[in-house]
Amino acid sequence: MSRPGAWRTAMRFAVYQVSRKGGREKNEDRMGYCYTRDAGLFALADGMGGHPEGEVASQLALQMLAALFQRAAKPKLENPTRFLNEAIIAGHHQLLRYATQKALLDTPRTTLVACLLQGNAAYWAHCGDSRLYLVRGAKLVARTRDHSYSELQETLRHDVMPAERFNRNVLFTCLGSPGKPVVDTVGPLLLQRGDRMLLCSDGLWGNVSDAEITDQLANHPISQAVPDLVEMALRKGGAKCDNVTVLAIEWESAESADSAAAVSTQALGDEVFASTIQASVLGQEASDELDEAEIERSIREIKDAIQRSAQRKT
């Protein structure tokens, strides 16, 4: 694994995110990102069906991650890998507390995948089967390995039973489970200009192949690749398609600085924290369709904060 190079005092990236309910009654996926001048956190969670309040589980996990990031990134993290591990475990404990406070018979559960950008390096962690893909040029450089029994056997190269006898949704770990979650962490990985990272729920990768995901990221701007991949998954998934949620980042993006997707932290002060992960009243129903108008509104608020910070510095 490459070591991060010289420290940078600002970042430039593009980010694009879409979430669709598909054929499900509600959208239990959540996504978002937050950043300071020197570090960025991107996260996606997929609340698990078969357990109560999956949408609350995914939202609580993201809120915990963002709150701890805001506290620790001043404006950078001392140890990004340790932060990811500890913050995800903290999200797990938050779900256990919530279940106790609400006297629930079962604990809300969720998967989670998160990516941290700091300096010129990427770090990521996951629990469950929400994935991260890293594409460089036309090549898939890295992909997380699901915490599912089918992928475990494939990874260990054991004799695998026929695929139809495996349920890809059966996980051996998640946040909110009775035992301590398994959290896999990776990094630092030295980034190159144009690297693209994609976080997604199983509603995407369950319907669209790794090759198709790689091809879209390699050959189209993320502002085109993300909605096209989501629509492809919805078509292939049909009437009973799972929630489909995707968040993609391009490092040192070629996107126009005026684009809604483009972010530069150059003008941010040391204490500025920007976030699209909104705090909400527990149990309050969130929007099932996180559309571009809502996302662009959050981005405009962030850019206004950046502009105010820049004006104070001049």
Image (spheres, rainbow, N blue to C red):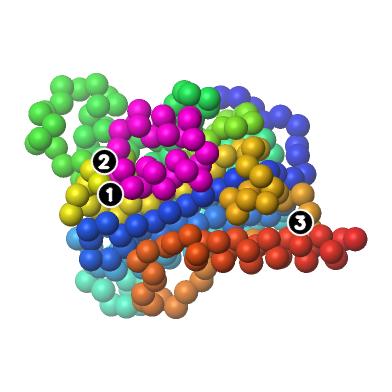
Q: Is residue 176 visible?
A: no
67 relative to 96 in the view: left or right: right
Q: Which tag is nearer the camera, tag 1 or tag 2?
A: 1
Q: Earlier in the sequence, mark 1 or mark 2?
A: 2
Residue at the image position 64 percent from the left and 66 percent from the top: 301
Q: Is residue 217 magenta?
A: yes
Q: Position of residue 67 (x, y in %)?
A: 56, 63
Q: Earlier in the sequence, mark 3 or mark 2?
A: 2
Q: Amino acid at mark 2?
A: Asn
Q: Is residue 230 visible?
A: yes
- Magenta-colored span: 207-233
Marks 1 and 2 sit apart, C-alpha to C-alpha, by 8 Å
Q: Secondary structure at mark 1?
A: helix
Q: Amino acid at mark 3?
A: Leu
Residue at the image position 74 percent from the left and 45 percent from the top: 10
Q: Which mark is residue 234?
A: 1
Q: Which residue is mark 3?
A: 268
Callout 1: 10 Å neighbours few (<14), some, many (20+)?
Answer: many
Q: Secondary structure at mark 2?
A: loop
Q: Secondary structure at mark 3?
A: loop
Q: Which residue is mark 2?
A: 207
Q: Which mark is residue 100?
A: none
